[in-house]
Image: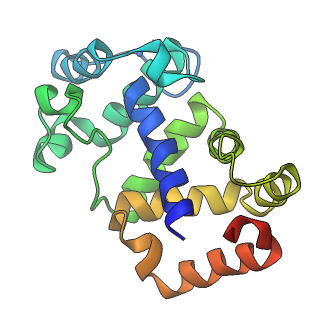
Amino acid sequence: MRKLTSIALSSLLVLAAACGDDDGGGSGDLSGPEQEFVDAAMAEFDPEDAEPLTEDDARCVVTSLVEELGVDRLEELGLTPESFGSEEGAPFPENLSEDEANGVVDGFEGCLDLAGLFTQSMAEDDSIDDETRECLADAFDKSMVRRLFVTMLTQGEDAMTEDPELLSDIMSVFMKCPGALG
């Protein structure tokens, strides 16, 4: 279970590390304060840390997040442009409403393939074989990955192991893919 939480978090962290106007989620018509948040996040962009995301992917993700939540809500969540762009900060807030989290995930999906990113994170785990990776990629389809991201954005990382329904669904995946358990 810790491995799954780690994979989900690493996918979010790749997005965070990557964190622009683009072809995907954001419209690019940002107000000055919105642009400050995007600029702060993009100031920390490092192509090596963000791989496989490009700078355009990252800009799209950050822009869509800022557009979806807005400056007032970001500030209400305790984020400033400085904290949003800092390496110590968590640019993906927790305690969003279900609607907000789904809007954020919609924006992310307009920028990149979240399920593909999640699967790619699993593929980097050398402790599982190719057959297990394929099994997990099939089991963690787009709807399951969305559910994981929405849960993390609404309830935080601990919800991955504390939500009985989600935990049951995750455990059923591991029952289908026993090689993932080590």
- Relative to residue 143, is residue 64 depicted above or below? above
Which residue shows up at 65% across the image and 80% down it? 171
Residue 121: % across, % down? 62, 42
Which residue is nearer to you in this view: 115 or 123? 123
Which residue shows up at 78% across the image and 63% down it? 139
- Relative to residue 73, is residue 85 depicted above or below? above
Taking the view exactly as shown, the residue that stands out farthest to the right is: 131
Residue 165: % across, % down? 55, 85
Q: How many marks can you see?
A: 0
Residue 4: % across, % down? 56, 61
Left or right: residue 164 versus residue 79 is right
Q: Quadrant of residue 32?
A: top left
- Relative to residue 87, is residue 106 depicted above or below? below
- Relative to residue 174, is residue 107 depicted above or below? above
Residue 34: % across, % down? 23, 23
Image colouring: rainbow
Quadrant in the picture for the C terminus: bottom right
Left or right: residue 65 versus residue 174 is left
Which residue is nearer to you in this view: 130 or 84? 130
Left or right: residue 62 versus residue 102 is left
Which residue shows up at 71% across the image and 59% down it? 140
Which residue is nearer to you in this view: 5 or 104? 5
Quadrant in the picture for the N terminus: bottom right
